[in-house]
Image (cartoon, helix red, strand yellow):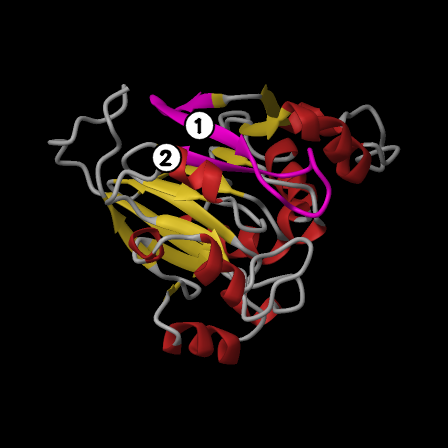
Amino acid sequence: MASSPTDSAEWILHFLGVGNAAAPELGSASVVLERNGTPLLMVDCGQEALSAFLDRYGQPPPAVFITHVHMDHVAGLERLFVANFFGSEQQNRTRLHVPAMLVPLLQGRIADYPNVVAEGGANFWDAFQLIPVSRGFWQAGCWFDVFPVRHHQPGTACGLCLRGAFLYSGDTRPIPEVIAQYADGSMPLVHDCDLHGNPSHTGLPDLLREYPPEQIRQMIVYHYASAADGAALSAAGLRVAKPGDRLRLPAPALT
């Protein structure tokens, strides 16, 4: 079961990477939810993010949630297939939580290539436990809400929330009507933001215009273009995530 507000466990959100696709030095955007130092869920799996995960934890992630299928968020799945498929028999397959509307896109993007191993006889999904999700999913005794976001084309991206602990917007334009459903006045709101917005991402002026000050104070922003842009966001008064940051979370609300 999810934790009560008095749970003594240590809940951490570890930022593996915080950059956009053009900022490999900041790592591909991804976080890991930990409980007492044990990774429970990785969000997205770009190349740099998977490398950072393996360096930190020494084994493949037990579970991954995919927000959308741009390659800086899913390219690590090919390496993860290799790690799982050729791993020890005792190694569990990674649980892959994918919004149902994204499964066909992920299939075409990653899994359709013929002969995923040179010798044949293997399917891409043999190395995973694929779990299509709609309004949410269970992982490690916790319920995660899943919600659509505004990432260029409707129906192509989602965020998630572990109520009471954190919300992760995924890559998105401002979604104040969604954030308002989950914000509780205290849990961190991890939100896409760079200096300048575009049809897929939130810019600093967008963030300041669309959200009330009390929610902005709860935000930690990520997915910016450079260290200099991160410094500029910080100078504007935002909390800015950096690669390797470890954010202590409130205990999740009792489910």
Q: Amino acid at mark 2?
A: Tyr
Q: Is residue 255 left or right of residue 57?
A: left
Q: Which residues are magenta?
A: 137-161
Q: Determine the secondary structure under disc 1.
A: strand
Percent x, y for residue 150?
62, 43
Percent x, y for residue 176?
46, 44
- Cα separation, mark 2 vs mark 1, equals 9 Å
Q: Amino acid at mark 1?
A: Asp
**One can see residue 17 in this view:** no
Work out whether residue 194 or residue 252 is closer to the camera in this orientation and state it: 194
**Which is nearer the N-term, disc 2 or disc 1?**
1
Residue name at image x 27 percent, y 35 percent? 164
Instruction: Name the mark nearer the viewer: 2 or 1.
Output: 2
Residue that badge 2 annotates? 182
Q: Quadrant of residue 224?
A: bottom right
Percent x, y for residue 246?
32, 56
Q: Is residue 78 magenta?
A: no
Residue 194's place in the image compared with 56, above or below, is below
Residue name at image x 71 percent, y 50 percent? 71
Asked if labels 1 and 2 touch by Cβ distance under 8 angstroms, the answer is: yes
Percent x, y for residue 171?
58, 50
Residue that badge 1 annotates? 145
Q: Quadrant of the C terminus?
A: top left
Mark 1 residue crowding within 10 angstroms, few (<14) / some (14–19) / many (20+): some
Q: Determine the secondary structure under disc 2.
A: helix
